Image: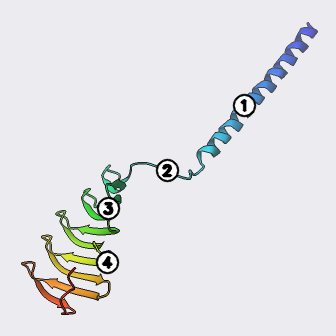
Amino acid sequence: MQHEINELRNQVRTLKRMLLGVFGLVVVGGLLAATTLQSVPDVIQAKKFEVINDNGTTQASLGSYRNGGILTIENKEGEIVNVLSATSDGGALGMYNNKRIQVLELAVDTDSNGSLIVCNKGGKSAAGLSAIEDYGGVVVTLDNKGKVSSQTPETPLPSK
């Protein structure tokens, strides 16, 4: 009887050691898995990224279109108010009013000159500022019919 009790004690001791070993392996495996999940990838690729608010409305998106990349920023209603995009000439930044009409554009034109165009609430150009190579800076204002009302310098722009 004593021999059987000693044998049972040895078996229980062995089972405890095995249980502690398995538990230790599970803990070590969990820690390794947790540290592997926290590593930062070198590159994240997707066709589009979106930032949404608590209501699920898109507030910003980063994606691509035919000319390159595009970044849009929306107001709380999800209406686009700013667009930064690649163009065939370089890039453009457009700002829109609450009626989705562009009222400001900062861009590179077809001759790779920088320009700023300010529009009225209806989207008609009202003023512009351009840098023209070999000519300098030009400021232009337009009347409500789209005709030039003033230009500085007053010298006519060179035609191409």
Mark whose residue sits in front, 3 or 4 = 4
Where disc 1 sits, the SS reads helix
Q: Are marks 3 and 2 in contact (CB under 8 Å)?
A: no
Neighbour tally class for label 3: few under 14, some 14-19, many 20 plus, Cα within 10 Å:
many
Neighbour tally class for label 1: few under 14, some 14-19, many 20 plus, Cα within 10 Å:
few
Neighbour tally class for label 4: few under 14, some 14-19, many 20 plus, Cα within 10 Å:
some
Distance between mark 2 and mark 4 Cα atoms: 33 Å
- For marks 3 and 2, the one nearer the N-term is 2
Mark 1, residue position: 23
Where disc 4 sits, the SS reads strand
Mark whose residue sits in front, 2 or 4 = 4
Q: Quadrant of residue 126?
A: bottom left
Q: What residue type is labelled 3?
A: Ile
Q: What residue type is labelled 2?
A: Ile
Mark 2, residue position: 44
- For marks 3 and 1, the one nearer the N-term is 1
- For marks 2 and 1, the one nearer the N-term is 1
What residue is rendered at 64% in x and 45% in y? 35
Would residue 30 be found to the left or right of residue 18 on screen? left
Q: What residue type is labelled 1?
A: Phe
Would residue 10 be found to the left or right of residue 29 on screen? right
With respect to residue 55, does 140 lie above or below?
below
With respect to residue 92, does 34 lie above or below?
above
What residue is rendered at 27% in x and 71% in y? 110
Distance between mark 2 and mark 1 Cα atoms: 36 Å
What residue is rendered at 16% in x and 76% in y? 125
Mark 3, residue position: 73
Would residue 104 be found to the left or right of residue 15 on screen? left
**Disc number placed over residue 114 in the picture, else none:** 4
Mark whose residue sits in front, 4 or 1 = 4
Neighbour tally class for label 2: few under 14, some 14-19, many 20 plus, Cα within 10 Å:
few
* The furthest residue to the left: 145
